[in-house]
Amino acid sequence: MKPPKATRLPSGNWHVRMRIKGQDINITRPTEAEAVAEAMAIRAGLKQPEAAAKNITLANAMDRYISMYRGALSASTIRGYSYIRYHRFQNLMPLSIAHISREQWQAAIDRESRVVKPKTVKNAWGLVTAVLTDNGLRIPDIKLPQMVKNEHEFLTAEQIIVFVEAMRGQPGELAALLGLHSLRRSEILDLTWDDIDLKRQLIHVRGAAVFDDNHKVVHQTANKNITSRRDVPIMIDRLEELLATTPRTSKYIVTCNPNTISPQVNRVCAAAGLPEVGAHGLRHSFASLAKHVGMPEETAMKIGGWKDYTTMHKIYTHISERDQAAKVKAMRDFYKSKSANEIDNDK
């Protein structure tokens, strides 16, 4: 009897998946030898498999999934998973995961859609599909709420100038200017004074500060992805001034409550008549300005630490369409301002 193949999970455990008499059997053990030995014993009938998925509730399946990947995923991801576990699809949690019907899933999706944003529902469903797959179950064909495009997810070049002036001297100014340099909130909160090189005009982005599932800030040496580790040029004079004059009373540059950054940004935006883009919208505003000044996408991606073209291309395309619309309007205004006789006289 040929031994089954075991694959190593990101958590470091070893996993074997088999199908015996129409039943999917999933085995996870600390070592490859243990996983293979368990599988061989079950295949030979010497040992009964663990409880089938049909006997596992959705709550238990999620708990097991989160526990399995706790060592491999970031603290913020685990925190997000834990939040979904205790706040989404609560009416289905006591039910057998294998016996939840497509209609029940759709009804649960519809209920969630009435109380949270479409993106939140999509993220929660993403965890559900991972858990279903982990238990060898088919993903039901359900309809997710339509994602509504946010037309104000970043500031335009003209709005950025207004924002920088309006933010001067306000609480959160330092964090906001770092956001306009493409830094994520997690990167802003992890930034130390040792990461600032005023002589070379560089910000060294090396780590991230995130909430764990106990709602405590954890400083990680790893960024969101490999491209996030980068050197960002200081491009705003006011930021250079603040970095040179702010008292260094802590190891970290920004020491405020992480949850206050977006409200501070939005408060200033609202007062200045600008779209309320929040902290992450300032990062996208960097891409907006990069397009405006003619910076190639590849360069903007490198400075911003984006790993693919999706976000950059979306913002660049949006700005291009906006610029095109402005040029078309200018031409229409030209024709409206000239009568046919005036145009003839210009010849």
Image: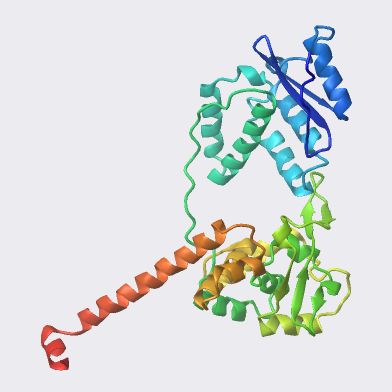
Q: Residue 270 appears at what percent x and percent y? A: 55, 68
Vertical relation: 212 (above or below) 159: above
119 or 8: nearer the viewer: 8
Residue pushed farthest top?
A: 45
| Point 56% across, 59% down: residue | 309
314 or 272: nearer the viewer: 314
289 or 306: nearer the viewer: 306
User: Is 141 left, or right, of 184 in this rendering?
Assistant: left
Q: Residue 219 appears at what percent x and percent y? A: 83, 57
Vertical relation: 314 (above or below) 300: above
Q: Quadrant of the C terminus?
A: bottom left
Vertical relation: 200 (above or below) 6: below
| Point 58% across, 40% down: residue | 121
Say whether residue 43 is visible: yes
Vertical relation: 142 (above or below) 203: above
Q: Quadrant of the N terminus?
A: top right
Q: How many marks?
A: 0
Q: Residue 135 appears at what percent x and percent y? A: 69, 24
214 or 29: nearer the viewer: 29
Say whether residue 153 is visible: no
| Point 37% across, 71% down: residue | 324
Q: Residue 231 appears at what percent x and percent y? A: 74, 71
Residue pushed farthest front?
A: 2
Specify the color scheme.
Answer: rainbow
| Point 80% across, 42% down: residue | 72
Image quadrant where residue 63 sits: top right
Image quadrant where residue 258 sits: bottom right
